[in-house]
Amino acid sequence: MKTVLNVALPKGRLGEKVLAMFEKAGYPCPSIHESNRKLIFENEECGVRYFWVKPSDVAIYVERGAADIGVAGKDILLEYGPDVYELLDLDIGKCRMAVAAKNDFRDDPRRTLRVATKFSRIAADFYAKKGRDIDIIHLNGSIELAPILDLSDVIVDIVETGTTLKENDLSVVETVVPISARLIANKASYKFKGEAIAAIAENLKQQTEATT
Amino acid sequence: MTRESEVARTETRTVARLGALYRSYGYAQYKMSKFEEYELYVRNKDFLVSNQIITFTDNGRLMALKPDVTLSIIRNGEEAQKVYYNEHVYRVPKGGAGFREMLQVGLECMGEIDAFRTYEVLMLAAESLAVLAEDFVLDISHMGVVCAALDAAALSPAGRAAVLRAVADKSLQTVAAVCASEGVCAETAALLRALVTDCGAPADVLPRWRAALPEGEARRAVDELAATALALVERYGARIRIDFSVLNDMGYYNGIVFKGFVNGVPASVLSGGRYDTLMRKMGKRAGAIGFAVYMDELARLTDVPPVYDVDTVLLYDETADLAALRAAVEALVAEGVSVSAERAVPEKRTYRRLMRLVGEGVETIEDRA
């Protein structure tokens, strides 16, 4: 029997790009392009089964073995630290995790820095390395509002083009870490479906290298 | 039989089989208290899977529900001993939220650790995996080999930590990026990349490592790894693999380290290694090697037959003769099945067989067997 690989794809624009890469790598799945409400799409011939999940959940599906492989942003991997293999930097979905603040912000080291973010762990690690005392304000969205309403001094968030920041008189203070999409694999799946996973990883790697 | 009891029975059977296996190689069972002084864990918190511990005070002493077994055995046991245990530990699983009670089975060999004892402990690890499932893999690494490759690169402390993390993640590009940013020479960078890529069958992989590493401690580490791994291959074939992504904390482990996987469980179910460094930290001179089997993940492997709350539902109505009903229930119980006598079909309980009391006898209305 052919090994079937369960692949967790992140919903959204990034996921569409990733799917295109998988299809180009020889793992197409025509049914995934049909408009219906199905949740799982399988191509038995190629031995793949795709499903769309919320981008921040991909790592959980893979860590717990519901998916053998998946594609997740480095931001999610740093924030949640899932126990998975990070096989490949796909070099897409590129952006950066950055500290941003109002244009006139000046850090006052005598005071605790108030940091609003969705990425508490990344922010805590970043400032711990600097030995800076901070107060983390965990938000789930519209992070940019926080410094404007004086809820926080700075934010730690993903910056792609910087347009939202600019339009709200905010700017990047410093980069925390560059972010891109990564191919991740469940550790046990890698032991028992290693050849199939390595074949996909190798093909995706060639595509990545061809475009850079 | 309910699902819970079936899973529990399988677990009990597995624990008994593992215990018998360890006893047949001269290991004695070690029993211990559920509590330890909290101080033991504070001093060695990096050794623990999670640093969250349940604590309470007992006559002014701060106590903990034990999150780990090895530390207790080192502290309370003999300097040289061969013991196994099956104990409950209390901790927050990796990636989980909240404490769980987990059954852990394990084995510790303390004293003079020579080539045979090392082999025997790893053989028992492989044999334990075989008890759990037919299809298993034992990944083996050696901290000495990984350290030798890292030492050759002379990285900054941050770079060294980043490469270690990347090797554990199998992230080749991160290894390459750190090497580039730290100006590591091409030859050494290739050696570090090989920690990610050059894994697999011991007979293929280890000769290359022997040739790549300098004489001395590094070479001895490869030779030790080879002696153990090749002996295991004779018995277990392709199930034994070299994989340097198996990395345990360098502050505690020093020699061979290993992790076991069984097909059908998404995380490693067995983890162990040589931990002389931890012994030194705790004031013991002897060497030590051991492993733990995490039983909590194994419930997934149990094949559970369809489950019913009760085997037979026996229906009766207000006209039923009390003596006949009593006799019918007793007769079914005597057959060894569970019976629930009901006036109407119960809505929320599942059953295998539905019967009805008719006069002095019973008739079957439905049988799902």
Image: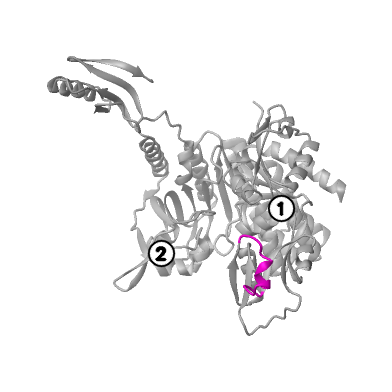
Q: Residue B353 at x, y = what percent?
A: 33, 22
Which residue lies at the image location 60% right of the left edge and 36% below the top edge? B237
Indicate whether B78 appears above or below B296: below
- Check if mark 1 and mark 2 are on a common chain: yes
Q: Is residue B119 left or right of residue B323?
A: right
The reply to whether the magenta stretch includes residue B141 is no
Q: Residue A37 at x, y = what percent?
A: 64, 34
Query: Which amino acid does the dot numbered 1 rest on?
Result: Ser
Residue B283 visible in the snapshot: no
For the residues labelled 1 and 2, the Cα–Cα distance comes to 38 Å
Marks 1, 2: nearer the viewer? 1
Check disc 2 and report the residue beneath it: B75
Check disc 1 and report the residue beneath it: B171
Q: Indicate which disc, 1 or 2, sits on the residue closer to the N terminus.
A: 2
Q: Residue B177 at x, y = what percent?
A: 78, 59
Say which element carries label 2: helix
For disc 2, the neighbor class at 10 Å (few under 14, some 14 to 19, many from 20) is some
Which residue lies at the image location 83% right of the left edge and 58% below the top edge? B186
Mark 1, chain letter?
B
For disc 1, the neighbor class at 10 Å (few under 14, some 14 to 19, many from 20) is many
Q: Which residues are magenta?
A: A140-153
| Foreground residue among A111 and B232 | A111
